[in-house]
Image: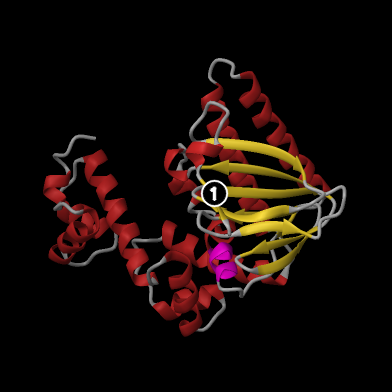
Amino acid sequence: MTARIFARNHFTRGLDFIYLSDNRLPNGYGEHSHDYIEIVITVEGRAKHRINGRLYDTVPGDVCVIQGGDMHGFELATKDFRVINIMYLPEKVVFPLPLLLKLPGYHALFVIEPAQRLEGEFRASLRLDSLGLSSVLALARRMEDELEGKRLGFESILHALLLELVATLSRDYSKSPEAGAQKLLRMGEAVAWMETNYASQVSLSELAKKASVSERQFLRLFTKAFGHPPVEHLLRIRVNAAAQMLKKSGCRVSEAAFACGFNDSSYFTRQFKRILGVAPKRYTKLEP
């Protein structure tokens, strides 16, 4: 029977948003799932990483992001097999998410690749060179030091270090020479383009071209990764951007609509209410 691990029971170091462990696993580790995101970094040795029933080789420098709900474990490990696991609950982490969403590597590593593995279609993962691995291990050591020391402000520093780790891995993914990684990175580039150019008019064929795949393949891969098609994703980006604009600038609803890519203020109002559950004018009166 596969074990299910919950953050409320597993995060036992005084914080409810993050946990870090450094383990030698010569006997591997049983298959399990959890309700948090886990960044798995192979430091030494080799093993077979079983993810959702499929086996993948893992060697030093390999980085794998396990989303909540994925089943994984290690088997056929060498005696010196060692991994560092950095676990966090995204809903409790203070991240500047709009900035991360502009990074193609973030979409590729943290969203698209896990979705591909879920379907058994993708075998490659981020593999750091010795310099990249040393840099990431140095970050992990600093996080461990803050968790152990619990000095004044350690929670804030841990949020900052986790953000640095996620951004660093996203950047490293963008430099990966692996063919499979490059394929997903092009998908990530199309998504990041949507995040930064949401006010522009763009067709499905143009997005597919940016990802270097057919329209049908882009639609299938995108929907699998994000849970909705590209058109819906773009609508949500635009509505959220407009919501921020309404809150911060106090502009008129029609101004926010046109600035964020909508050509019809009535259509904008309908989509705004559907996605956020409240009409734009009422949204501006809600308490922050």
State the residue in front, 11 or 264: 11
Which range of residues does the magenta coloring cover? 112-118
Q: In this figure, what is the number of numbered marks?
A: 1
Verify whether residue 114 appears in magenta.
yes
Locate residue 160: give its quadrant: top right
Instruction: Specify the farthest residue to the right.
Output: 79
Quadrant where the C terminus is found in the figure = top left
- Left or right of 17 in this view: 264: left
Locate residue 52: give its quadrant: bottom right
Locate residue 12: give its quadrant: top right
- Left or right of 187 in this view: 72: right
- The majority secondary structure of the magenta stretch comes to helix
- Left or right of 103 in this view: 275: left
- Report x, y in % for residue 205: 44, 81
- Report x, y in % for residue 223: 43, 72
The 10 Å Cα crowd at callout 1, few under 14, some 14 to 19, many 20 or more, is many
Name the amino acid, label 1. Answer: Ile
- Left or right of 217 in this view: 236: left
Please name the residue that numbered disc 1 is placed on.
Answer: 37
Instruction: Specify the farthest residue to the top.
Output: 152
